């Protein structure tokens, strides 16, 4: 499974993020170990209070565990992976919290440790934790028989179209698949050997090359969104400069935005908005079905938890009632039978807990199977929208190319009629 960890502070904000049900369909706090508090926010406040006695600012270590989408990973499998990571990073026995999330039919886990050792009042060191997480991740893929991602199978062999959270959020605002933006810009880069050719190739796809304030080179799309060029290409800034130079002849971001605004015709903007509105209507219809399913699934889990809790309490009372008391209990202790009966009761408790965990897992598996059907429809809808916007970007690129220089009005009209099928 993919493991992403970070040292951090701000436990209160992290607790709010982990418990958000507006971004996650299901949230379950599985474990709070080593804390007095019984809720996530209180637990992280405890960790922060302890850290005040040290000089450590990043008093938490936060880890996300994401298995392959179609994998069936039980709670026990997640717990075993977390224990392995804990030993590998030197966080044995530290207070920790485990939270499970389900979103878009996928299940993943978060584990957060307090780094502060209360006995010595020092922070547990986490040197080279990224390398260690990579090693554990590779072992987990091999142990479970999952196909290794390129970046794990061969170090450095990462998918060039992978994106960060910030890039995903930026693409989400536009209703675009962030992978397509990277693919388009990387294709332009591959077929260009200088700044002029690269800028022309970008413009043909609806992008503009500009000079940023601090990031060196940036790319703007036809909506004015700014993308860091080295980040999109997956290259270092000096590698980009080696091909494009110092960018002295490029316009600034603000100048480029003004140029885009001047060359974009109202008809093009209207066509873009119509495509987005059509996608929003179809997405809302499907989203309503998803919300109804989520409410039903949440209720089923609450009902199951209530039934299993009642079953657990009834079993505990029954096991306690079987243990002899008074003189009989004393005699059983003397003869050793009490210890045998107690051990049997403990085995029964473990067996019942295992059965209950399996019942929860079966319910989760059934619900994930139901959710997978809707998610397939969402993926098809998003793919269709991405294809439409990709084609529209190409049309916009041709229009902007035709509108450059002398005779812009004639070229613009030709671009609108042949590329977009619109009238100004």
Image (spheres, grey):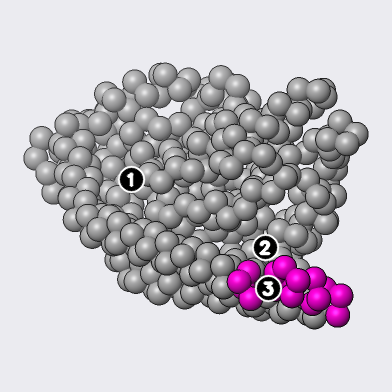
**Toward which corner of the image does residue 232 lie, by quadrant?**
top right
Q: Nearer the viewer, mark 1 or mark 3?
A: 3
The one nearer the camera, 335 or 404, is 335
* Disc 3: which residue: 323
Name the residue carrying label 1: 175
Image: 358 above or below 217: below
Q: Which residues are magenta?
A: 319-335
In primary-sequence order, the first of circles 2 and 3 is 2
Q: Is residue 378 visible?
A: no
Tell me how far mark 2 sits from mark 1, CA to CA: 36 Å
The picture places residue 423, in percent across and down from the top left corner, at: 9, 40
Q: Which residue lies at the image location 71% right of the left edge and 37% below the top edge?
A: 60
Q: Residues within 10 Å of mark 3 (few under 14, many from 20)?
A: some
In the picture, the quarter occupied by the N terminus is: bottom right
Q: Tell me the SS state at disc 1.
A: loop
Mark 2 secondary-structure assignment: helix
Distance, label 2 to label 3, CA atoms, is 32 Å
Residue name at image x 56 percent, y 19 percent: 213
Q: Specify the quadrant that holds the C terminus.
A: top left
Of the numbered discs 1 and 3, the one sitting upstream in the chain is 1
- What secondary structure characterizes most of the magenta part? helix
**Horizontal relation, residue 260 to residue 84: left or right:** left
Quick check: is 334 in the magenta stretch? yes
Provide residue 107's location: percent of width, then percent of height: 50, 61
Give how far apart the Cα atoms at labels 1 and 3 are: 64 Å
- The answer to which quarter of the image holds residue 305 is bottom left
Q: Nearer the viewer, residue 68 or 43?
A: 43
Looking at this view, name the residue that lies furthest to the right: 120
Q: Nearer the viewer, mark 2 or mark 1?
A: 2
Q: Which residue does the image show at 13% across and 49% down from the upper left?
A: 421
Identify the residue position indicated by label 2 in the image: 79
């Amino acid at each position: 499974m993919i493991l992403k960890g970070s040292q951090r502070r701000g436990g209160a904000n992290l607790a709010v993020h982990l418990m958000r049900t507006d971004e996650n369909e299901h949230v379950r706090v599985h474990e709070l170990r080593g804390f007095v508090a019984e809720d996530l926010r209180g637990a992280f406040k405890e960790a922060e209070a302890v850290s005040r006695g040290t000089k450590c600012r990043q008093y938490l270590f936060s880890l996300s565990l994401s298995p392959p989408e179609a994998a069936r990973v039980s709670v026990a499998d997640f717990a075993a992976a977390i224990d392995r990571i804990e030993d590998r990073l030197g966080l044995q026995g530290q207070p920790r919290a485990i939270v499970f999330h389900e979103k878009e039919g996928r299940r993943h886990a978060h584990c957060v440790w307090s780094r502060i050792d209360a006995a010595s009042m020092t922070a547990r060191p986490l040197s080279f934790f990224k390398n260690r997480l990579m090693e554990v991740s590779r072992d987990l893929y091999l142990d479970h028989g999952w196909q290794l991602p390129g970046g794990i199978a061969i170090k450095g062999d990462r998918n060039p179209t992978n994106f960060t959270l910030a890039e995903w959020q930026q693409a989400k605002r536009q209703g675009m698949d962030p992978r397509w933006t990277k693919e388009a810009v990387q294709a332009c880069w591959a077929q260009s050997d200088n700044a002029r050719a690269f800028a022309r190739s970008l413009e043909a796809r609806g992008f503009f090359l500009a000079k940023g304030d601090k990031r060196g080179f940036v790319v703007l799309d036809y909506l004015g969104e700014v993308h860091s060029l080295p980040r999109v290409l997956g290259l270092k800034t000096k590698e980009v400069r080696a091909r494009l130079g110092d960018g002295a002849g490029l316009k600034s971001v603000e100048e480029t935005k003004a140029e885009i605004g001047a060359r974009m015709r109202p008809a093009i903007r209207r066509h873009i908005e119509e495509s987005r509105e059509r996608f929003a209507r179809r997405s809302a219809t499907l989203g309503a079905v998803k919300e109804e399913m989520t409410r039903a699934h949440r209720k089923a889990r609450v009902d199951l938890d209530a039934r299993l809790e009642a079953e657990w309490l009834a079993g505990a009372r029954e096991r306690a009632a079987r243990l002899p008391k008074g003189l009989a209990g004393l005699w059983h202790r003397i003869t050793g039978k009490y210890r045998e009966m107690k051990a049997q009761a403990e085995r029964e408790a473990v067996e019942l807990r295992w059965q209950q965990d399996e019942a929860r897992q079966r319910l989760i598996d059934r619900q994930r199977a139901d959710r997978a059907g809707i998610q397939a429809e969402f993926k098809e809808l998003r793919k269709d929208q991405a294809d439409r916007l990709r084609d529209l970007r190409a049309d916009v690129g041709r229009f902007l190319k035709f509108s450059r220089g002398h005779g812009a009005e004639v070229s613009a009209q030709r671009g609108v009629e042949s590329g977009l099928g619109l009238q100004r």
